[in-house]
């Protein structure tokens, strides 16, 4: 393999170099949103464009560009696809046992109001799933849940994409924050706390935004008390856990706390009118609360609610409780380290020092250069085959244990897994291609070219630097990958402009969460889970303005921290878990 150093301005004009670097993104979004090409083909076309741009515009050897693509595909399969497939597998098991119907009825028994069901499932339950598995799995599971409740497939997909924002920075047991600390070499506790001082504001806004995206203003304000309970409870726990505990369980605790507070609140408060879809039949929007509420499952008079004893309801939710236990264990560092050391090939060197995995053919063959890094630095490319300690394995084992406890025999478990793989096949291809595209972007340096273009915004960099994180997630489909792409650049640029690097690295992750709803990976998962393959462009056009507007709100919050309240940026945070 040849060695190569990244080039950041091959045309001598930063704007022209940035335009060429953006070609893969332009191709991807034009094909998917403009021409309605299926996401896996759009992602493959974008990846192919990225390889050609890397070779002919930025002089990257074909062997390194191809190796970067394959490295990204392998990483996507291990770190993202495995998690999403395992989470959907758990859902499929719940459907096969009839538990999913019981779960739906338990939510419907709390409230028949569609606005409140949206908050409970898409926001609260979705945040819990994001904390456990991340990487699009809440869009799949909560989206399928909402269809079962009677939501239109389009609403189930689009609204879950909007809901899956505020929790994303701590998805999959805090993986994005861990990555940010790795690439920036800044204290993880400080960046974790800073993210926890930015996103709680949006956690209050998003529930309101979510309901307003489905119903008019008047109907939104009718459930304002419940919206505030959802948002404030989630935001307060998100702030407290990130600033005083750790980065692993922020979403899990905040999601569960918000769900509990909201359920308790709804025991004592009801909206004046029950809001339903007209196609529900029977009672529709405007029915007084407590009068003639239809059930949640079919029939000429609308969906039907079945009442179940507590024991049966507990059994239905048991697999997801088991999932939370496995996630706690897989996130516990001593357990994870033991699994890595004892089961992962090439995790340690011969003298027992951490190695991290196998050296890929492109390992240390590509170097970043100034001004992206302080001095020329080879880019590592080790592939850790963490088959046991991977979060996806924990989710998969939780599904198997939960299914076994619920009486599913091994043969049926195997058949269900085959069914899950088959129906997720196009999503798997799209995710793999997207990660391949993201890795070509990273190793070719075109990510840095785009990032450096943002540095020309000067005083406004806190705002546009936040959108750099947004761009990273929109491009790669992952806040983790965005932090890997742009975390170091944010730190260096902040230092050059006299800004706080803790603030700007945290802003990369916080801004990135709002790009989650427009990335091809999430949209593909949403359409696959809600049986809407082919409608990706329609969904993209619906959510894109929500994504940009919410990203702008995060940018304004970061600007205020940078120039109005810089003293609130944390330094030297000591977490209670340390």
Image (spheres, rainbow, N blue to C red):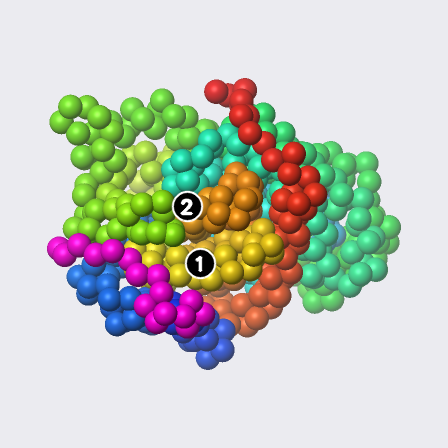
Q: Position of residue 92 (x, y in %)?
A: 44, 49
Of the two numbered discs 1 and 2 in the rendering, the one whose residue sits closer to the viewer: 1
Q: Quadrant of residue 62 in the image?
A: bottom left
Task: Tell me the residue at 39%/31% (across/down).
Answer: 330
Q: Residues within 10 Å of mark 1 (few under 14, many from 20)?
A: many
Q: Quadrant of residue 149 in the image?
A: bottom right
Q: Say which label, 1 or 2, has the lower sequence index.
A: 1
The answer to whether 283 is drawn above or below residue 333 in the figure is below
Front position in the image: 192 or 10: 10
Query: Is 7 a magenta residue?
Result: yes
According to the picture, the residue beneath numbered tag 2 turns out to be 488
Q: Which mark is residue 142?
A: none
Q: Which residues are magenta?
A: 1-16
Task: Tell me the residue at 53%/22% (across/down).
Answer: 574
The answer to whether 529 is drawn above or below residue 254 in the figure is below
Q: How many marks?
A: 2
The chief SS type of the magenta part is loop
Residue 305 visible in image: no
Q: Which mark is residue 452?
A: 1
**Label 2: which secondary element:** helix
Front position in the image: 406 or 568: 568
The answer to whether 420 is drawn above or below residue 188 in the figure is below
Q: Is residue 576 left or right of residue 440?
A: right
């Amino acid at each position: 393999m040849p060695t190569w150093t990244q080039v950041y301005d091959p045309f001598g004009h930063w704007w022209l170099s940035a335009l060429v670097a953006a070609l893969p993104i332009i191709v991807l979004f034009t094909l998917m949103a403009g021409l309605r090409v299926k996401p896996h083909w759009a992602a493959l076309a974008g990846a192919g464009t990225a390889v050609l741009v890397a070779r002919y515009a930025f002089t990257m050897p074909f062997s390194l560009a191809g190796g970067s693509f394959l490295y990204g595909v392998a990483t996507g399969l291990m770190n993202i696809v495995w998690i999403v497939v395992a989470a959907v597998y758990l859902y499929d098991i719940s459907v096969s046992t009839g538990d999913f119907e019981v779960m739906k009825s338990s939510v419907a028994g709390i409230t028949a109001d569609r606005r409140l069901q949206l908050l409970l499932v898409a926001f609260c339950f979705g945040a819990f799933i994001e904390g456990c598995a991340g990487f699009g799995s809440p869009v799949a599971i909560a989206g399928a849940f909402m269809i079962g409740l009677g939501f239109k497939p389009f609403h189930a997909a689009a609204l879950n994409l909007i809901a899956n924002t505020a929790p994303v920075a701590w998805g999959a047991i805090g993986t994005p924050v861990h990555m940010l600390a790795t690439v920036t070499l800044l204290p993880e506790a400080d960046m974790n706390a800073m993210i926890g001082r930015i996103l709680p504001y949006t956690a209050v806004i998003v529930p309101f935004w979510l309901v307003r995206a489905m119903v008019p203003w008047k109907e939104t304000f009718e459930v304002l008390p419940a919206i505030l309970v959802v948002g404030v409870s989630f935001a307060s726990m998100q702030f407290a856990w990130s600033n005083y505990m750790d980065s692993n369980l922020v979403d899990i605790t905040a999601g569960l706390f918000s769900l509990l507070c909201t359920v308790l609140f709804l025991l004592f408060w009801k909206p004046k009118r029950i809001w339903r879809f007209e196609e529900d039949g029977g009672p529709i929007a405007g029915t007084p609360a407590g009068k003639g509420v239809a059930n949640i499952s079919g029939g000429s008079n609308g969906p039907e609610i079945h009442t179940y004893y507590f024991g049966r309801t507990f059994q239905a939710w048991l697999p997801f409780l088991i999932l939370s236990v496995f996630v706690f264990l897989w996130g516990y560092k001593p357990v994870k380290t033991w699994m890595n050391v004892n089961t992962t090939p090439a995790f340690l060197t011969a003298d027992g020092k951490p190695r991290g995995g196998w050296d890929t053919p492109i390992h240390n063959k590509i170097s970043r250069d100034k001004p992206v890094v302080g001095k020329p630095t080879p880019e590592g490319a080790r592939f850790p085959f963490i088959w046991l300690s991977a979060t996806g394995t924990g989710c998969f084992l939780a599904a198997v244990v939960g299914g076994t406890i619920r009486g599913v025999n091994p043969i049926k478990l195997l058949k269900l897994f085959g069914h899950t793989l088959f129906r997720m096949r196009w999503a798997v291809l799209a995710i793999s291609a997207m990660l391949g595209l993201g890795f070509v972007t990273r190793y070719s340096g075109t990510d840095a070219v785009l990032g450096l273009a943002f540095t020309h915004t000067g005083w406004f960099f806190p705002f546009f630097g936040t959108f750099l994180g947004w761009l990273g997630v929109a491009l790669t489909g992952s806040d983790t990958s965005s932090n890997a792409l742009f975390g170091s650049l944010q730190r260096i640029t902040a230092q050059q402009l006299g800004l706080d690097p803790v603030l700007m690295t945290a802003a990369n992750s916080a801004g990135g969460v709002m790009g989650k709803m427009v990335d091809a990976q999430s949209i593909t998962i949403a359409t696959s889970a809600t049986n809407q393959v082919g409608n990706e462009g329609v969904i993209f056009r619906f959510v894109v303005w929500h994504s940009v507007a919410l990203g702008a709100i995060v940018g304004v919050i970061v600007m205020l921290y940078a120039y109005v309240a810089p003293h609130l940026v944390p330094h030297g945070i000591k977490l209670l878990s340390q």
